[in-house]
Amino acid sequence: MESPEKFRILIVDDSDFSRLNMSKMLTEAKYNIIGEAANAKEAKAILSDRKAHLAILDVVMPEVSGIELAQHISDNYKDTAIMMVSSLAGESIIIDSISAGASDYLQKPFKKENFLASVEKILERFNLE
Amino acid sequence: METEKYKFTTSSIIDVLQASMLPELNIYNQAQLEIDTPLIKAQNVHPKTTHEVGVKLKLEGDLSGEVFCLIDTYNKDVAQTEGQFFKTLFIESMNILMGQVLTLLENEHDISCLVSHPEFLDRDSKLELSIQRDTTTMNVGYKFISIHNEFDCRILFNICK
C-alpha cells in the first residue's frame, strides 16, 4: 500500500468526541486529514474545495443523515470512497448504507486496529503513482 | 407493502428492553458503563436535579417515544479543564449505548427504530416526559466510570405503545 500520508481523509460526525477519537487514530497512523465536519453542510463545503480519497461518515446526524450524505458523495464525487461508522448496526441501516455507496460499515465503539484495517482495506483500491 | 406496526403490551416492552440492556460497555478505554440497577417500570419519576446533566433522544418506528440519559455530578469534581471533554465523552457514551440497544432490538427481536441526534440537557433543563394514556416509563441505572471519577447514571425510556 502507498504511504498513509498520501491519502486524504474527511471525517464527518456530529459527536465532538468521535471526531477527535478518529482524527487521533488516523493522525497517529500518518494519514492526511483534510477536514472534520459536524454535519452534511460542513462536509459538502469541504468537499467542494478539497479532494478526499475517503470520507468517514456517521449515520445519525442532525438534518441530513449520513446515509443521505453518502448518496450525495457517491453521485458527485466518484473518486471518494465512503466508510460508515455508527453505534447502530441493524441490518436495514447497513443495507441502506451499502446501497448509498459505502464500502464498509463499522459499529461503534470499535477497536483502533479494526478501524485502521478497514481504512487501509478501502484505500487499497487507489493507485497514487 | 405496508407492514403491520409491532404490537406491544407493557410487559412485552419491558421484557424486550430488559433483554437488550448491555451489562457493560467499554467506550474507547476512556469510560466504562456498568449496569447498576435493572430496567424496571418506573412508578414515580424523580424530578431532574440541578446536579444532573444529560441527553434526550427521540425514538421513532416500532417503538416511539423518548429516552433521557441523566448523569449525577453531585459532589464530583469535574475540573473546568476536562469539563468539555467529559461532556462530549458522556454524550458519545450514551449515543453508543442506545445504538447498541437499538441494534439488539432489531437483530434479536425484529423491532426497528430510528433514533434522533442527541439533545443536550444542561443543569437548568427540566425533565419533561410526554405522558399519554398509552405511555410506559421505564428506568435503568448505570455506573459511568471515567478515568478520574465514578458517576450514577439513570436512563428513562418513555415509550408509547
Image (tube, coloured by chain):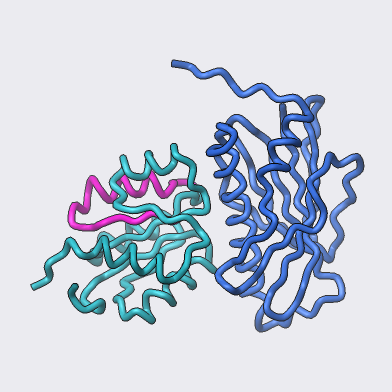
Chain colours: A cyan, B blue
Name the spot of residue B136 as percent of width and height, x first: 79, 33
Judged left or right of residue A52, residue B118 is: right
Q: Residue at x 72, y 54 (%)?
A: B69
Residue placed furthest toward the top = B1
Judged left or right of residue A38, residue B76 is: right
Query: Residue B105 is drawn in which quadrant?
Result: top right
Query: Residue B92 is drawn in which quadrant?
Result: bottom right
Query: Residue A41 is drawn in which quadrant?
Result: bottom left
Name the spot of residue A36 as percent of width and height, x first: 40, 68
Q: Residue at x 20, y 65 (%)?
A: A124
**Number of residue marks:** 0
Name the spot of residue A3 as percent of width and height, x first: 21, 79
Relative height, residue A72 to residue A3 (above, below):
above
Name the spot of residue A63 as percent of width and height, x first: 48, 46
Residue placed furthest toward the left = A129
Q: Which quadrant is the C terminus of chain B positioned in?
A: top right
> Residue A78: within the magenta?
yes
Relative height, residue A86 to residue B157 (above, below):
below
Relative height, residue A25 to residue A77 (above, below):
below
Judged left or right of residue B142, residue A108 is: left
Relative height, residue B153 to residue A88 (above, below):
below
Q: Residue at x 49, y 51 (%)?
A: A61
Per the rendered image, the range of residues in magenta is A63-85
